[in-house]
Image (cartoon, rainbow, N blue to C red):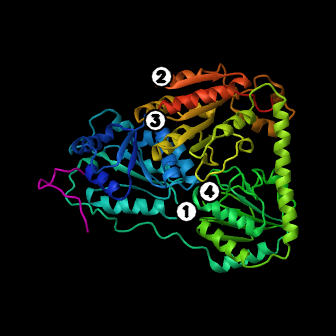
Amino acid sequence: MKVHAISEAPDSISAAEAYLRALFARGIGCMFINAGTDFASIVEAYARTGGSGLPVSIIVPHENTAAAMAHGYFAASGQMAAVMVHVGVGTANTTNGIFNAARQNVPILFTAGRNPIHESGPLGARNNIIHWAQEMFDQGGMVRELVKWDYELRSPEQIGPVVDRAMAIALSEPQGPVYLSLPREVLAAPAMEAVPENAKFSAYARPSPNADAIEKATKLLSQASRPLIITSASGANLHSVAALGRLAEALGAPVVQHRPTHMCLSARHPCHAGFDPHPLLAEADAILVLDCDVPWIPARATPSDDCKVVQIGPDPLFSNYPIRSFPAEIAIAGDTLEAMDMLADRFEARSPETSDKRRAWLEEAISMDRARCSNAKAKDEARDVITPEYASACIGEIIDRDTVLVNEYSLVLEHCPMTEPGSYFSHSSAGGLGWGLGAALGIKLADRTKRVLCVVGDGAYMFGNPTPAHFVARAYELPTLTIVFNNKMWGAVQRATLSMYPNGAASQAESPPLSCLEPSPNYEKIVEASDGYGERVTRRTDLPGALARALAALAEGKQALLNIETSRPGG
């Protein structure tokens, strides 16, 4: 077994350095860092080694941005990253990001310093006034409900087993974040023993779907005349995009991507039926749900009582959700890609008795979706304001095979068709705001050849800690284009109000209470402070030219931002 070399002096390498080396040896190539007083030994380790043999350190001046960067980095690369923040206060600022990662099954090693335990004595003991006030009775308790595992490192001898366990649990299905706190005295202590370079144990193999359950699902779906597939996150595995297309064709079923977090099926695929399942639910007699926590909104529409539902995913019942009552005649836990291939093999091997009915059903579903899009486009073209639909269509015109689109709330996918696996990422259904800017930076860091566009609302932009995000973009040469859909309000709040009180007082108010963000800042000026290109767009006819100028800035290696004044919900 390989071990890291340690010189003869027992205190020549600290536990902090041994810990960092263990992370790097186990595949943690990046660590997104927001440092504090607990980082002294971490700082010393990077200074002593020059970073050689340690994870690349990315300084991020806000913890929420750091969490989002690690999220985006994994989404684009499939490589787990680490985040390290300052004790409990830093952990509090990552909670939004931990929530998002948990609900999207993103494995991240969240680490935080732990307040010094000793009031005096060993190296690392308390020597600052904050070391009393910042201590918590249960620091990990802040995030315990959201992470798969949490622990506090007790001694340098534990480093190997603790890191191995943290990564193994995070990477085992269903994947998710873990949390490790690191007391300052432990990090400062000498690593008396070498840490094995190779992990002693790793994530367990991804479980295969149960063959008997797949056979039952095949029989159930084969008997359907109007089968429907609903997904949201199956495209997280890039190979699943082609597999879903093959399955849809074999079954003869329309595919709806409901609030997708990934591009699951190309908009050009003959079975692509848009993004709204509700018009199809009443007629469907069987529904296959793939990696989708909320396949429909019951308040809007529900399947008939006779409709049979099959749910497939690493945890098809989403057992970490307190309540979720979507039916599951058959629930199959396991790798979704493998399950789709198993189903497709079986459907291709038999001739469905209702193939004519299915073809008619598929054509009807696609026709309904196209009619909705056509009507919406006609209504939009009659307006002289910049609507989210129009802005989305303009963005769709500039997308190429090397473009990755990050969406936090505002993009209208019906007007911006995506076709390439790995070309689209959106926020988790937990809706922890401030994810988009950091995720875009993490995606760009993972693949600098990609042109990364990030679409956010004005509220999400402010939550995204724009000054730290633009700082990171400049400091690490990660140029991205941020497109702010600026309606000068919390659009989600207004939409929620209108959904409950469509004819209420708030619907008539020029400035609805608790929703408006006025006076609106000049967001385009914020990026200029980090040597980026910024432009404000107020007229519909000016948007295509503004997008072209922003892309030209990206081509020159500069980050860019467009502040687009858009219409309001219901306006």
Q: Which secondary structure lies at badge 2? A: loop
Mark closer to the chain start, 3 or 1: 3
Q: Residue at x 85, y 36 (%)?
A: 378
Residue 324 figure quarter? bottom right
In the rendered view of the protein, which quadrant contains the N terminus?
A: bottom left
Q: Residue furthest bottom?
A: 212
Give the magenta range: 1-14
Tell me which amino acid carries mark 1. Pro
Mark closer to the chain start, 4 or 3: 3
Whether tag 3 and tag 1 are in contact, CB under 8 A, the answer is no
- Distance CA(mark 3)–CA(mark 1): 28 Å
Q: Which secondary structure lies at badge 1? A: loop
**Residue 131 horizontal side relative to residue 553, left or right:** left
- Distance CA(mark 4)–CA(mark 1): 15 Å
Q: Which secondary structure lies at badge 3? A: loop
**Which residue in the structure is indicated by mark 4?**
235
Whether tag 4 and tag 1 are in contact, CB under 8 A, the answer is no
- Distance CA(mark 2)–CA(mark 3): 17 Å
Residue 561 figure quarter? top right
- Distance CA(mark 4)–CA(mark 2): 37 Å
**Residue 127 horizontal side relative to residue 570, left or right:** left
Whether tag 2 and tag 3 are in contact, CB under 8 A, the answer is no
Between tags 2 and 1, which lies in front?
Answer: 2
Q: Residue at x 61, y 64 (%)?
A: 315
